[in-house]
Image (tube, rainbow, N blue to C red):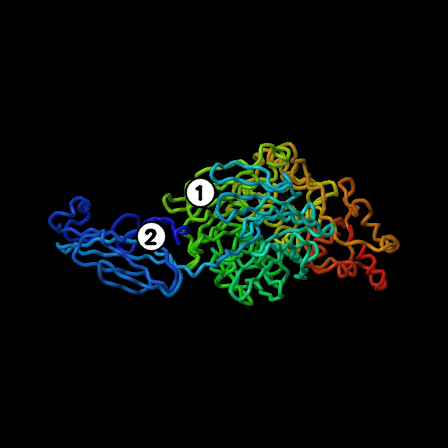
Amino acid sequence: SPEHVHDSGRAVRICGLLVLGACTGPAGQGGAAGPSRDDRRGAQPASAVADAGDDAYVEVGKPLVLDASGSLGVSFSWDLGDGSVAEGETVQHVWTAPGNYPVVLSVTGADGGWRSDSIQVVVHAPLLDPAPAWSGTLARSPDGRWLYAALPEADAVIQVETATGQPREFLGCRSPRSVSVAPDGAVGAACTGDDALMVREADGQEWGLGFETGTMPAGVVPNRDGVWAVSLAGIGQVVRVSRHGEQSRHDVGPDPRALAWLPGPGGDRTYVARWRSDDAGGHVQTLAGDVAMLPVDERGDSDTTTGGLPNLIEQLVPTPDGAALVLPMVHSNDIRGAWLSGELLLHDTTVRAVVTMLSPDAPSDSVDARKQLDDRGRANAVVPSPLGDKLYIVHTGTRTVSILDRWTQNLVGSIQDTGAAPTGAVVSPDGRVLYVYAWLDREVRAFDVSGETTPPAELSRWRLIEDEPLAADELAGKRIFWDASDKRITRAGYIACSNCHPDGDHDGRTWDFTDRGEGLRNTPSLLGRSGMAMGPLHWSGNFDEIQDFENEFRGSSGGLGFLSAADWDEAGPPLGAAKSGRSSELDALAAYVSSLDETPRSPFVADPGDEDVFLSAGCDRCHPAPTYTDSSLALYTRHDIGTLTEATGDRLASGPLDGLDTPTLLGVWASPPYLHDGSATDLHAAVLAHEGAGVLSPDQLDAIVRFIRSL
């Protein structure tokens, strides 16, 4: 259809290579140019002229006419890209499968010489009407006039006019997690800080619906009937609501975030994906309860692939034809390590960006068919082109976009500088412009993806806000936390702090750090710790300042580090001379991590008397209020509660570990699995793992767990 047509560039084949220009045979004029169009009305020239026309777009199963009337010659041959050939100046062809087909026209001149020209034919499946919808940090109106960016630090959804780049606050909303647009132009946002859904209708009317405290709205998606679905990550539910109130609630399991709405003749469906996966793999399901799994990739690692668990699924995006759900994610390779597999966990085998496509009706994806992206630690977001022939993959850590051919999954292009921490992207309705949300630059950048420039040229960048809500050092530190493009942080774009501590939280995984002088270590959340306010970092208490992450940069991440050689010689070892004050970048990182002073609000409420049971059982000896930890930098206290094993390893490779640093219980309801090795899947198991807990009655155990979950 005309609104989807765009020029994606011209390419032809010379000696089997796809290049720009035209292909000329050895006879006649050789490589000389053919006659001009003005000369064609005279006597028939000896040399051939090949003109295959413009790139074309056609629905699968429908005929397309290919016209070589702009060419000159005595014979015309078409290679149609699907194994078929045709002869004639004008031919008609039907492609039976969607794909990107290079069509090559070869023209023979009267002198026996030949020339070739090539076009690209995009064959697509029928497009859904209305179009599918999904949740993300950036969305656009159906007509492409407006963009909407969720900016959590500014407590707002910002609207940008694409014609002028003019921004304005569109919805007031505390810590918006995601935004989506309905077919009629209504805009909805999941407001995590408000535990609410906010919607602004196409006519300008606003309404909202609040949920219980701590429910943590994360994803939002509309349907065609003015009903919105919201994923409540805190309680494992998806709620369907309209401006008149709740319509239904659906239990979908822990940590739901990404949402997608897929219209169809057999009935509309809403899909939800879990953000953090369990040991079995990734989970995608419908509200009707149909579940699809993304299994662990146990095939091992190579130079270009990494095994592991599909994890941190931020988006779930249907293709425009509804034939596939595209999921950007990370392979968390926590099945590898010196203890677990006898293999070292390296900077390029720890995490890797992966994209998978799942059939809406399939019970699982194909591990073999997953696209793994080299030198990228995580895929955060994805958007398909309007016809679904290309996929634009956003990599927050490397500040890049990978452009994939949907059908072959070949990398056909990339954008190398999108700004700091891109988290979302959308494409204009005509497919010519890609808009990328550079979250930590507070910008939207527009790129020409029409094929007229290679690589795609930046067209414009628009500032979303005038006043930065974060202090300068906190913003600088947050950019470092999310960055994997700086060689001082990591060698090849894989490891960013945020790849294991997304949003300062935890990834739900347990890692084998045996080769680093530690052991099996469950990723702790940094939220609410205020940096060093709750004592030394890590399970073994091996860092006494945030700046000690210099050792991670230079070690497991393979980076160059921020300290000068002299400062590194003096202050290299953790727990030694202070690194603070020696690097503005490390100090900025410390400022950001220290600003993480809030834990997720709990949706759970303790019963009267539960705290008394907690106290009478002696839990407060190690977990005293108000921080619920006895850890401090004044006294390095470690405890052996009976969970140490041979796999626990050492502390900085300095000998057997005598105990573990006490983790805070604040926000612990939101951070499974538990214990240093992740061996407790729930809080009941975590409490019972303590020596002496076996004397607790079932009622006492339940009371202690209720109290802990309420913190």
Residue identifier under label 2: 55
Q: CA distance from mark 1 to mark 2?
A: 20 Å
Q: Position of residue 404 (x, y in %)?
A: 44, 53
Q: Is residue 193 above or below residue 605?
A: above
Say if residue 110 shows up in the picture.
Answer: yes
Q: Position of residue 413 (x, y in %)?
A: 41, 49
Q: Which residue type does callout 1 highlight?
A: Phe
Front in this rendered view, residue 467 or 668: 467
Q: How many marks?
A: 2
Q: Residue furthest left?
A: 43
| Quarter of the image where one finds residue 477 | top right
Badge 1 or badge 2: first in the primary sequence:
2
Left or right side of 380 for 667: right
Q: Position of residue 645 (x, y in %)?
A: 71, 59
Q: Is residue 573 above or below residue 699?
A: above
Front in this rendered view, residue 375 or 395: 395
Tag 1 secondary structure: strand
Q: Position of residue 116 (x, y in %)?
A: 24, 54
Residue identifier under label 1: 447
Indicate which disc residue 87 carries: none
From the image, which quarter does the N terminus lie in?
bottom left
Q: Which residue type does callout 2 highlight?
A: Asp
Q: Residues within 10 Å of mark 1 (few under 14, many from 20)?
A: many
Q: Nearer the viewer, mark 1 or mark 2?
A: 2
Front in this rendered view, residue 322 or 438: 322
Q: Residue furthest front?
A: 203
Left or right side of 74 for 141: right
Q: Residues within 10 Å of mark 2 (few under 14, many from 20)?
A: some
